[in-house]
Amino acid sequence: MKALRIHGGRIDLAATHYPRAPQPWLDLSTGINPCAWQAEPFPPLDLHRLPSPTAIGDLEAAAATMFGTSADRVVALPGSELGLRSLDVLGLPSPVRFVTPSYGTHAEAITRATPIARDAIDAISEGTLLLANPNNPDGDIDSPDRLLRIVRRGVWLVVDEAFADAVPARNLIPCLASEDPAIVFRSFGKFFGLAGVRLGFMIAPATQAAAMRRRLGSWPISALAVAYGTAAYRDVAWIAKARRSIVERADRLDMLLARHGLRGSGACPLFRLVQCDDAAAVFERLAQSGILTRPFDTAPRWLRFGVPGDDAAFERLDRALSRG
């Protein structure tokens, strides 16, 4: 089914296509942390009023602390996807290149952008370069030093760090000076497991941050996103525990896959990419067992597995793979 090879998380379509699959579905197709942040007590939420500039500023300050930068450089967005699709308004210089293979939106984000292989980016000396770090879907991670060398040559670097909260030591943001020609996008939903909140951030120099704020207007995000985001970014104990848990579960997934003759690759602990000749057959077998993974139109040997959230999910995946 083509729609399942374009984007993850489409459980409704999978359930329609595989009506005899056992319920509930186990969604391993997204790379979103299945162990979501939870608040006790519930964050205060007032849906009768528009979010105040002060409240949005508090959210951006809380996020900035986690990112390792100053709050004036952080712009709250209704999801990092919208930020990527708004790059044309920032006046970034040509030529524009995007690294491939990577997240599909990158090819559409900036008008007249052309693809470039990741191993060729060190030769770029002008224009704009868009890439993901960690990369999606293969989980490859470039060091901040490599990316900084590109920035220091005067290239405008746009980095999609949607999965970066799980690998803080490899993040670019703390390494950037305020005047560096670099823009970084962060996603709230991936690491905190709350994609439905629709919250993301752009970290950018003052001129580009101001342009994005003008684009978004006075109330860029919902009161729910403000309340959840502020409380979650301030929960330093949960953040530290989640980072450890994600890595431990990624190691466990590697061992599970290996037992079934599958090799998980990538350095992003939120997902693993498997390359094998029978990827389509493995996807089909798992889907018939009510487990959704992520196949790819452009790479028929690829199958991505999000990291399961608990013992029951690991055991279910193990049983389904054993039926091959």
Image (spheres, helix red, strand yellow):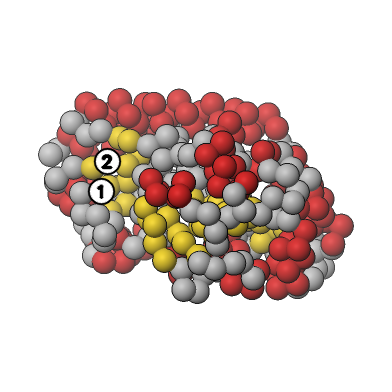
Could you classify mark 1 by the number of other residues whose Cα lies within 10 Å: few (under 14), some (14-19), or many (20 or more)? Answer: many
Location of residue 152 in the rendering, given as x and y in whole percent from the top left corner: 62, 46
Q: Is residue 302 visible?
A: yes
Type of amino acid under label 2: Val
Residue 101 sits in which quadrant?
bottom left
Left or right relative to 30: residue 199: right
Disc 1 target residue: 302
Type of amino acid under label 1: Trp
- Specify which label sits upstream in the sequence, 1 or 2: 2
- Please tell me which residue lies in front, 107 or 182: 182
Left or right relative to 301: residue 316: right
Location of residue 192 in the rendering, given as x and y in whole percent from the top left corner: 58, 44
Q: Which quadrant, please, contains the C terminus?
A: top left
Alpha carbon distance from label 1 to label 2: 6 Å
> Pointers 1 and 2 in contact (CB under 8 A)?
yes
Q: Which numbered marker is on residue 92?
A: none
> Residue at the spot x=74%, y=51% of the render?
179
Disc 2 target residue: 274
Q: Secondary structure at mark 1?
A: strand
| Residue 209 to residue 71: above or below | below
| Residue 81 to residue 243: above or below | below
> Residue at the spot x=20%, y=37% of the render?
321
Q: Which quadrant, please, contains the N terminus?
A: bottom left
> Residue at the spot x=51%, y=57% of the render?
130
